[in-house]
Image: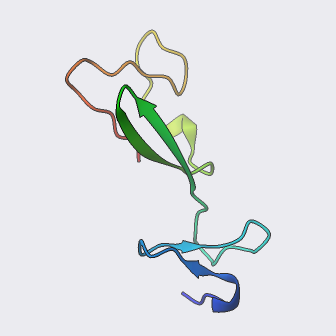
Amino acid sequence: MFLDIGSVVDNQKGNYEIPLDQPLPRNALRQYERSEKLDTVEHQILIIRQAITEAKYLQPGMPKNEWIVPEKHYFMDG
């Protein structure tokens, strides 16, 4: 993969941050990082908007893209 180093920043996590006004390399997906705090635990969340939502699991009785995670379980999407 070719990256124009002049417009790309290595964020020391092994990832590259490409400015929003720059095109992505071929076959790359842009990820948006968010954080969420539940009680005293903070979680980092990566969102890929290009993901196809129709291919995701639909939990019975819940709207699209909403899930109830059973107690003592965790949820992972991706």
Rendered position, 24 above or below 67: below
Q: Residue furthest left?
A: 72
Q: Relative to 62, is 23 on the left or the right? A: right
Between residue 55 and residue 63, name the one nearer to us: 63
Q: Relative to 78, is 54 on the left or the right? A: right
Answer whether residue 56 is visible to the viewer in this image: no
Rendered position, 19 above or below 34: below
Rendered position, 8 above or below 60: below
The residue at 42%/75% (across/down) is 14
Image coloring type:
rainbow
- Quadrant assignment for the N terminus: bottom right
Rendered position, 8 above or below 55: below
Q: Percent from the top left, x then y, of residue 50?
A: 62, 51
Between residue 15 and residue 56, name the one nearer to us: 15
Q: Which of the 4 quarters of the picture holds residue 39?
A: top left
Answer whether residue 72 is visible to the viewer in this image: yes
Q: Which of the 4 quarters of the picture holds residue 18?
A: bottom right
Q: How many numbered tags mark residues here? A: 0
Q: Percent from the top left, x then y, of residue 33?
A: 54, 52
Q: Percent from the top left, x then y, of residue 57?
A: 42, 31
The residue at 59%/90% (across/down) is 2
Q: Residue furthest front?
A: 40
Q: Percent from the top left, x then y, of residue 22?
A: 76, 74
Q: Residue furthest top?
A: 61
Q: Which of the 4 quarters of the picture holds residue 5?
A: bottom right
The residue at 33%/22% (across/down) is 69
